[in-house]
Image (tube, grey):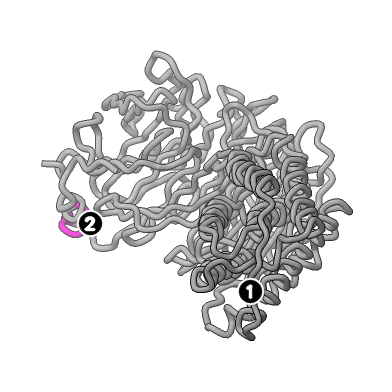
Amino acid sequence: MVRLVRPTLVILCFSCVPGLSIAQDWPGWRGERSNGVGVVSRAPERWSPTENVVWRAEIEGSGISSPVVVGQRVYVTTAIVWERRTVFQLVVGSFALFGIPTLAYYKRKRQQTERVSRVHRTVVLQTVHVLDAALFVLLAATVLVFATCMAMGPHTLDVPLHIIRDVGVTVARSLGRLQTNLSILTWSEAAEHNRWIISSAMAVASLGLIPFLFPSQSITRVASALAMLVGLALAMAYIPWPQGYGAHVPTGILIVPYLPVIAIAVWHVFRYVVGQRQCGSADGAGTTTGVRLASIVPPALSLAMCVSPNLSRDETVVTRRLVCFDMVSGQKIWRTDAFTARPEPISALNSYATPTPSVAGDTIVAAFGPGVAAFNLDGRLRWSQIFPGWIEGSVYGAGSSPIIDGSMVFVTNDREYESQRQSQVIAYSLQTGAELWRQSPQFAHDGYATPVIHHDGNRTLLLTLTARTLVAYVASNGEVAWRLTTPVGNPVPSLIVNGDTLYVTGGLSGGYTAAYHLRHDAAPEELWTSHRSPADVSSPLLYKDRLFTITSTGVMVSYNAESGDVIWRERVGSGLGVFYSSLVAADDKVYAVRSNGTTYVIAVDDRFRMVSESSLHEEIFASPAFARDCLLLRTVSALYCIGSEEASH
């Protein structure tokens, strides 16, 4: 994170602006009222990478979701793409490297044909030998059981993993540290994750079998303990835990599958200490050919099980993450992973973190393609829901953001072109994540627009735009209140509701810009329609009794919001890049962002007038946000807080 202007400037923006009595937030997609308007007293007009930048914070990973602001915190989602296959290469490689000196040792030992003459008769030493053999049998049996489960199929791992889960939960509850309900098999990827966990545990545990072949006083016992702990650290650091296993979960739960590894490592060190005190003693384990052969079989099976599911196929995974920054300084406060899954097919213009989070009270809801998760303001995961089959059915990726109304969260997932999955409109409890209702409309498909809430006095409606259809669902039970046919084939721009007027625009496949009167007992009544340059990606803007739209090629139209008359229609700027970011407005100015990093500031007037043109020289696809007299711009690699010229001076 690079600081460019002292944080006192931001504090001045927050607390010393004349006429600004209430700090305004930007709690979700398109702001407080979902219309793209920021409530600020002074909005910045000009900036550059070194001018009027209050702070710049690096964002790990990628995404095009917009930042949201509540209080003095900024929240943004991101996606980290990484390879988990390399981890297994390290774990299995350590096993292979450890096995080579083992074979060399026994070849030399057979040539020497050493005979040990001393017999141990002390009770302590005999007990140690018995425990040594017992631990060897227990560890070998564990590896063989897991190997058998792996060979029979992923579903057979349910029992051992649930036993592990139950033990971990019991321990955590006894310590009073359990913060979330855990569920291992929660989505279509669960079988692969279970296989990953078990095979990694097998690979590391197998390292502990080989040292049983060495004399107790051999330093190899200690070396093997260190190798096991290194393998354990690698597995713990890189395992993509399924739902419920986030960074906030007690470490005791995460380490349960590897407790045998830790126990055996400690045992080898203890055995070495005892062996040193009984110099020249024989090691009871490893003196017969049978034990040697039994020691080789489990590691061989472990190696085969690791190679088969993990090294023979692409293991690229994506971790979806929520990050919190301080609004004053830009310092990162916390980050929390929602879940990890293999990447879904997406458009080249989309990302794995496109939906914008939404905040209400002390809860943040972040949606990603494969699922949705809720966090408290300190980053603790409250609940998460995974959409089975979403990854397999994705074509262009996710686009619709979650919407919060009261105690309910609404999420829409439309079926895409040539996809076999069903469209879903789902309502969840904000506090618990419990599903309240679900609709699977057959008519809904290829919609990426974020829905809006409309309170008509008698009931609350969830308004959604899907291909060729405008739909209203009763928010309390999910019933379809009305449907209306539209010419928009692939809607991406969001809807805007102002009182009893609904504004619609879209044009990826056919399109128009229109206003409707929302009636209490019937479908909306059309007020006006225009087919002049409808927006295809960018969401419209309702500001100062005007409706603004912009096409991806930069043609902006200013309408009289009441009559639909075109006030002006002009092309904005020139140069490379497209307009995928949605329009925002504040302080009698409209902000249009081109993908090449250039932002055009346009006056709200009866004629087109460009106020300024500023660039950060970084690509921008996310929509801007306003908060505390500052403009937040997310580039492909960082988050910028732009202060007004007056504040920067």
Mark 1–mark 2 Cα distance, whole angstroms, equals 46 Å
Quarter occupied by residue 349: top right
Q: Is residue 92 visible to us here? A: no
Residue 14 image label: 2
Amino acid type of disc 1?
Answer: Gly
Residue at 20% x, 40% y is 4
Report whether 203 appears left or right of 246: right
Residue at 82% x, 58% y is 290
Q: Position of residue 631 (x, y in %)?
A: 32, 42
Q: Position of residue 287 (x, y in %)?
A: 73, 61
Report whether 203 appears left or right of 137: left
In the rendered structure, which segment of residues is drawn in magenta? 13-18
Amino acid type of disc 2?
Answer: Phe
Q: Earlier in the sequence, mark 1 or mark 2?
A: 2
Residue nearest the observer in this picture, 411 or 41 = 411
For label 1, the residue is: 168
Q: Quadrant of the N terminus?
A: top left
Report whether 649 appears left or right of 66: left
* Helix, strand or loop for disc 2: helix
Report whether 544 appears left or right of 452: left
Quarter occupied by residue 155: bottom right
Q: Position of residue 55 (x, y in %)?
A: 25, 43
Residue nearest the observer in this picture, 604 or 426 = 426
Q: Position of residue 101 (x, y in %)?
A: 60, 44
Residue at 52% x, 48% y is 356
